Amino acid sequence: MKFRKSVVLFCFALCSLGSIKAQSPVDIFESANEAYNNGQYGEAVDLYESIIDRNVHSSELYFNLGNAYYKLNQVAPSIYYFEKALMLNPNDDEIRKNLSFAQNMTIDSIEEIPEVGISRMINNATSIFSYNGWARMAVIFMLVFVSLFLLYYFSVSTAKKRLMFLGSFIALGISILSLSIAFRSFDRFKKDNPAIIFAEITEVRSDPNLRSEVVFNLHEGTKVQVLESFNTDWSKIKLSDGKTGWIASEDIRLLNFF
């Protein structure tokens, strides 16, 4: 597994400006890298996490922390921090590769339900841009619509009027489509609440109480979607194969929490 030695000065420097502590996050990051290179993975973990305790976050920090936990054969935290690194830098192939190495250490084998037809096309389109990107596109094409419609209204030539009229309504259609995709993308963003199983083995039950039936078991490192919570003690989860159930909230760690 590859390890990153470079310090992201821009990210850390912003968070360490004005600090009166003896060591800045940059210094700690370098010390953690040195400990990692010397095979002192436990010490490296402590140092990396001390940076997080200062409310400093970066994909490089999470990536190296995931590597350190991987070296310690701790599956759940390794996957957890690789996933967090990927959230901050989703196009990084190196993070994806190391994440796949860590996922190979998990016990649960869960097949993802493939998307087909129109649903797949819509979701593929949604993932091209963020909801902000689609919203910006909607605004841009609405401005294009207004401009072309004004040109149509004030144009004298019949041919130009037809061209401007057609162009304006094409722009209007694209704007409406972009806006609808933006709403769908935002809805998916709000519902996306992934978590990693941290318990070595945990029981998933049919209802949020210990008297309910155990429907299946999960093991550390498995990624789930949290659908809802009950009394803070129980979380309803969903797997990529569509199975759902209730799990003790203490057995998972949410990825969206920074």
Image (spheres, rainbow, N blue to C red):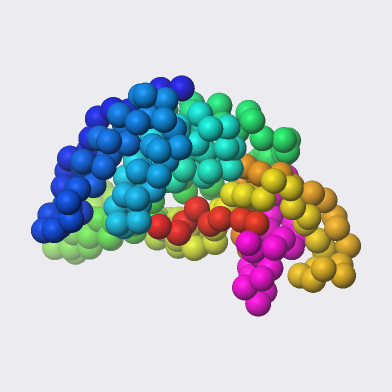
Is residue 185 visible in the rendered structure shown here? Answer: yes
Q: Residue visible at 38% across and 29% down?
A: 36
Asked whether residue 90 appears in the rendered view, the answer is no
Picture quadrant of residue 29: top left
Q: Residue 15 is drawn in which quadrant? A: bottom left
Q: Nearer the viewer, residue 185 or 200?
A: 200
Quick check: is 116 in the magenta stretch? no
Farthest residue, direction left: 18
Residue 77: percent from the left, percent from the top? Answer: 53, 43
Which one is nearer the viewer's eye here, 6 or 83?
6
Q: Which region of the structure is painted magenta?
A: 228-250
* Residue lying at 41% horizontally and 30% vertically, measured from the top left: 40
Q: x and y percent of residue 20 in the render?
A: 13, 58
Q: Is residue 212 above or below residue 218?
A: below
Pick the residue in front: 151 or 93: 93
In the depicted structure, whether residue 26 falls above or below residue 193: above
Residue at 32%, 36% (x, y): give it: 32
Q: Nearer the viewer, residue 129 or 159?
A: 129
Q: Is residue 181 left or right of residue 204?
A: left
238 is within the stretch colored magenta: yes
